[in-house]
Amino acid sequence: MKIFCDAALLNEACQNVQRAVSGKTTIPAIEGILLKALGGELMLTGYDLEMGITTSIPCQVAEQGAIILNARILCDIVRKIPGETVKIESDERMLTTIQGGEATYSLIGIDGNEFPELPTVSGGYPVVINQGLLKNMIRQTIFSVAVKDSKIIHTGVKFEISANLFRLVAVDGSRLAMRTEAIDYTGDELSFVVPSKTLNEVTKLLNEEDETVSLAVGKRHIIFEIGNYTIISRLLDGEFLKYQNAIPTTFTTTAIINVDEMISSIDRASLIITDKFISPVRFIFDENLVRLSSVTALGTANDSFPCKLEGQKVEIGFNNKLITEALRACDVDEVKIELNGGFAPIVILPKEGESFLFLILPMRFKKD
């Protein structure tokens, strides 16, 4: 293989593809990036047997071929190499020379044929959605994914796609996040769970607000086509929580609150709460006012902010981080908070519509 390519394009491609490379493995090939020169393009692929990222950049191909180079070393070299053009040349013994400006490196590569074949997805109806919209929907749900759960399936985000409806749902043992949008889709109903690791990488490539991303879904894998990048990932198996049963349908109290005011008030009331001194924040939803307080071995804190209340007075406690994360994901000025007394979950919704829903379980006070 012998190629000449733009240094900046190669660097960007290497940094993105590297995120799919396995860090700890007994298979040397998947510690590397596959470089494949064909026609007027260089294709780069990283794959850790669960998620793969592939892209291509234009280059001058003097000799076609394929080589696997250690991802960390290759990315470090192309990030720091001088000059605007990089020359990569490998011989039949897999000795590879990388040259840019006055710098030259020699690496021992691996035959490209030893790189594992990426899964394919065929058939099905493609799902097309705006990149900016998908990025926001993932951001507004992924924070509720379980980090440690006996059910691996809850470490991913559930996708539900039906006629003109696109929904993402994430749950852990204490909360639920749901985001719903109308989209142009007329295919079969789809339901699958994507690992949070994959979605974190997807969001890093979702940049073009006016561009679209295409999803192809199979029985075991999903492919995201984002610009000139392709991400393929396994799907998670198992039975996802029947989340609809967890969402209350009637409420005794409804409060309209300003999101920024509530976040600021929680922050002030949480200043005496630390990882060592853990305590719920006490909320008292009363006429036109929400009073907050917290008590730990460090002291006490009290604060309040205004609200518009309908229904019964409620006294309830929450983990300050869980409720703050939900509020930060709202992306609106005001939200509607619905409650059923001091021991039932709280539900946070937009003031108008149902584009998002956040459910949080309360914490009991010691006296309870």
Image (cartoon, rainbow, N blue to C red):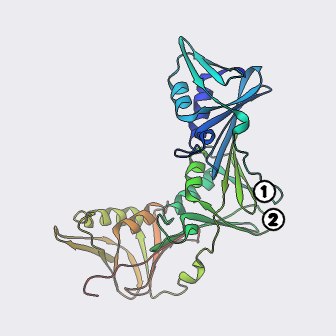
Decide if residue 178 is in sight here: no
Query: x, y (%) of residue 192?
Result: 67, 66
Does residue 241 lie above or below 35 as drawn? Answer: below
Query: x, y (%) of residue 216?
Result: 75, 55
Q: Name the residue under label 2.
A: 187
Residue at 54% in and 64% down: 155
Q: Distance between the residues labelled 2 and 1?
A: 8 Å
Q: Earlier in the sequence, mark 2 or mark 1?
A: 1
Query: x, y (%) of residue 314?
Result: 35, 85
Residue 278: which quarter of the image? Answer: bottom left
Q: Residue furthest top?
A: 102
Residue 283: which quarter of the image? Answer: bottom left
Q: What element carries label 1?
A: loop
Type of amino acid under label 1: Pro
Q: Name the residue under label 1.
A: 126
Q: Is mark 2 on a helix, strand or loop?
A: loop
Q: Which of 306 and 39 is in front in this view?
A: 39
Does residue 34 lie above or below 199 as drawn? Answer: above
Type of amino acid under label 2: Gly
Q: Which of 106 and 54 is in front in this view?
A: 106
